[in-house]
């Protein structure tokens, strides 16, 4: 059975596949969970290489978005407060308290 797409292609890639990978990553799931879901729904699934390609594409977009948001936030702080220093607090202890994260 040949696969089909219900969404337009973007840069020779189906946007539906990108949305599937994005949704799975938001839930903290990966390729195996996606394959299981699509098999349960009796839908064709993407190969692991294609899944990874979409993950890397999303990673680039997320990095770009984060950088733009941080630039906008720093400009906002500079405009709000004439001082150029801004304190930042980062807590990474959740990674050691029994929480499992596939995203970081």
Image: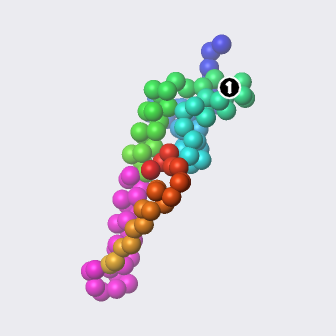
Q: Is residue 1 visible?
A: yes
The way the protein has been coloured in the rendering is rainbow
| Rendered location of residue 76, percent (x, y) | 38, 76
SS at circle 1: helix
Quadrant of residue 75 within the rendered picture: bottom left
The residue shown at (36%, 73%) is: 88
| Rendered location of residue 55, percent (x, y) | 46, 39
Q: Which residues are magenta?
A: 63-85
In this picture, residue 93 sits left or right of residue 3: left
Q: Nearest the camera: 66 or 29?
A: 29
Residue at the far right: name it: 41
Q: Nearest the camera: 1 or 102?
A: 102
Q: Is residue 24 magenta?
A: no
Q: Is residue 19 visible?
A: no
Relative height, residue 76 to residue 23 (above, below) = below
Instruction: Give the class, few, some or many, for how many residues have Cα within 10 Å of label 1's Cα (few <14, many ≥20).
Output: few
| Rendered location of residue 53, percent (x, y) | 43, 33
Relative height, residue 2 to residue 98 (above, below) = above
Q: Mark 1 highlights which residue?
A: 39
């Amino acid at each position: 059975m040949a696969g089909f797409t219900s969404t337009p292609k973007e840069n020779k890639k189906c946007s539906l596949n990108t949305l599937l990978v994005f949704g799975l990553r938001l839930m903290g799931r990966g390729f195996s969970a996606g394959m299981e879901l699509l098999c349960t729904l009796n839908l064709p699934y993407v190969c692991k290489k294609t899944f990874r390609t979409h993950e890397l594409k999303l990673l680039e977009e997320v990095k770009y978005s984060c950088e733009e948001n941080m630039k906008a936030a720093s400009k906002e702080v500079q405009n709000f407060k004439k001082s150029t220093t801004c304190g930042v607090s980062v807590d990474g202890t959740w990674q050691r308290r029994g929480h499992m994260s596939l995203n970081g």
